[in-house]
Amino acid sequence: MNLRRYQDEEPDLIIDIAPLIDVVFILLIFFMVSTTFNHEAEIEIKLPASVAQEPTDMPDNLIEISINAQGDYFLNGQTLVNQQTATLHRALTGLLPTTLEARQNFSVRLNADGRAPHQAVVTAMDVARRVGVHRLTFVIDNMDANP
C-alpha cells in the first residue's frame, strides 16, 4: 500500500508575463493611434537675398500680392475692392490655373509695407496656401541701397 500523497501540480514560482505583455502591447497601440503630428511648415517660405538690382520682368508663373500700410490688397497692381479674405481668395483663384499640379508651379511674391497690419500679411499667406500655392517669397528692401 502506497500512502504517499500524489501532488497534482507543483506550485509555480515563475510569474506568467503573458498578460503583462498583452497590456503593454495594447497601450503601445493606443499611444500610436492617439498621437497627433503637427505640420509646422506647410508653406515653403523662401526669404529673398538682399541684392541691389531689381527684377526686370515678372515671369508668367508669379503672382504679386502687395499690401499697403492700411491693409489694402493689390494683386499684380490691381486694387481689390475690400480687405475681406473671401475677396482675396476669389481674386487669387481667378489668376491661377484650374489644375492643382499647375498651381504648384506658381509662386506668390508678397510685398508688404513695413507698417502693414500683421493680420493682413498672415491672411495673404493663408489664402495662398489654401488655393494651392506652395512657394511664397517676401520682398525686402536692400539696407545698403537706402541711406
Image (cartoon, grey):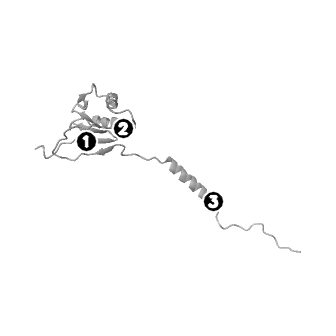
Tag in front: 2 or 3: 2
Spot the residue most to the left: 147
* Left or right for 27, reference 46: right
Residue occupied by mark 1: 138
First of labels 2, 3 by sequence position? 3
Image quadrant holding the N terminus, namely bottom right
Element under disc 1: strand
First of labels 2, 1 by sequence position? 2
Q: Position of residue 67 (x, y in %)?
A: 24, 33
First of labels 1, 3 by sequence position? 3
- For the residues marked 2 and 1, what is the alpha-carbon distance in whole angstroms? 21 Å
- For the residues marked 2 and 3, what is the alpha-carbon distance in whole angstroms? 55 Å
Crowding at mark 3 (Cα within 10 Å: few <14, some 14-19, many 20+): few
Looking at the picture, tell me which residue is in the foreground, 10 or 85.
Answer: 85
Is mark 2 in CB contact (under 8 Å) with mark 1? no
Residue occupied by mark 2: 102
